[in-house]
Image (cartoon, rainbow, N blue to C red):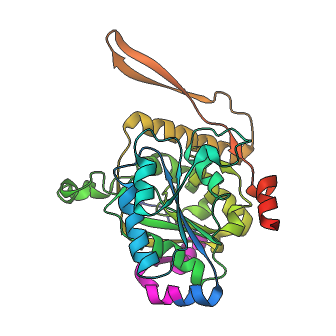
Amino acid sequence: MVTNSEEPQTVLEEVERWLATRSWSVADRPLHRLLSAKQRTGQTISVVLPALNEEETVGDIVTVIRHDLMERAPLVDEIVVVDSGSTDRTSAVAAAAGARVVHRDEILPRLPAVPGKGEVLWRSLLVTGGDILCFVDADLREFSSDFVLGIVGPLLTEPDVDLVKAMYDRPLAAGPEALAAGPTAGQGGRVTELMARPLLNMHWPQLAGFVQPLGGEYAARRSLLEQLPFPVGYGVELGMLVDALHLVGLDALAQVDVGVRKHRHQDGQALGRMAAAIYRTAQLRLARGHLVRPSLTQFVRGEDGFEPRTYSVDTEERPPMLEIVEYADRKVA
């Protein structure tokens, strides 16, 4: 029989088993079950929103989590917004909605902060107290508390699960136009399809079952996160998955379907810079070798034709938080 080369290849047997045993829906664990598990195990939950100029959306996200999962049902213990240098009213809006707001530069001030999402997530370990940390991007629209319920659920009910990623549809357009987009409605996540998924399938095929490997909504046990290095920029999600696989194994990782994710999309050049950072993160994990040229040149049309714009690709990673003296002192205290 002739096989069409464009047909998806058979997934590894191990991944097929993982998909059957470690991929769930948010409906699989209703709220009352999670509240019982939380009370029984005594685990605490911190929700962290890394934010940079997200005044339009951060307040709504905080409001929904507070109402649904703190006031109506005592599941979440704290909501912390870590502002990474916003020039708009992000901090004020988040605080008014009921979050505790901490500026990135106020955390571990002896170590100058560098720009990047991973930097903010890493520092959040020092200003949160939860046994489970739940990360949620601050640019989500039409936010549902199912995002939090879904990804903390397995951590409360399955003691052998250490990290849970959200999976969802990602419309390329938000709002009514997405509904009219037909087959293109699920084509968000361009860097995932063009960069991250090929890298994972070729080099870490055990992770091929993750629907949204780069998604910003995931939860993990502090005991895992404090052992992981954090790429400071856009490579943090891929780096975390790969490092967690090596540290705790595939069966300690899981994913939960939470529906649809709507957010602001980046332009093509921003996606290129994101892809370069992700490739750099993968390269370091493949060889821990020297990066020949840690920069990316792109082009924009100017008055005299195409003009080059060169951007540095972040090459820094923060060490496991357990190696930071201030964090170790806090644990002893």
What residue is shown at x 37% (from left), y 49% (from top)?
55
Report the span colored magenta: 13-35
State the predominant SS element of the stretch in magenta.
helix
Q: Which of the 4 image quarters holds residue 316?
A: top right
Regarding residue 193, the answer to whether it shows in the image is: no
Q: Is residue 203 depicted above or below 129 in this figure?
A: above
What residue is shown at x 43% (from left), y 51% (from top)?
92
Residue 130 image offset from top left, x and y in percent? 63, 70
Q: Which of the 4 image quarters holds residue 180?
A: bottom left
Quick one: quadrant of the C terminus? bottom right
Please name whichever residue, 169 or 197, is drawn nearer the observer in this view of the structure. 169
Please name whichever residue, 148 or 169, is drawn nearer the observer in this view of the structure. 148
Residue 330 image offset from top left, x and y in percent? 77, 62
Q: How many marks?
A: 0
Furthest toward the top, the residue is 304
What residue is shown at x 46% (from left), y 76% (from top)?
70
Residue 104 image offset from top left, x and y in percent? 59, 46
Left or right of 7, for residue 214: right
Q: Is residue 201 magenta?
A: no
Quick one: quadrant of the N terminus? bottom left
Q: Is residue 96 depicted above or below 26 in this figure?
A: above
Residue 165 image offset from top left, x and y in percent? 52, 66
What residue is shown at x 50% (from left), y 36% (from top)?
273
Left or right of 204, for residue 229: right
Regarding residue 283, the answer to whether it shows in the image is: yes
Left or right of 162, for residue 262: left
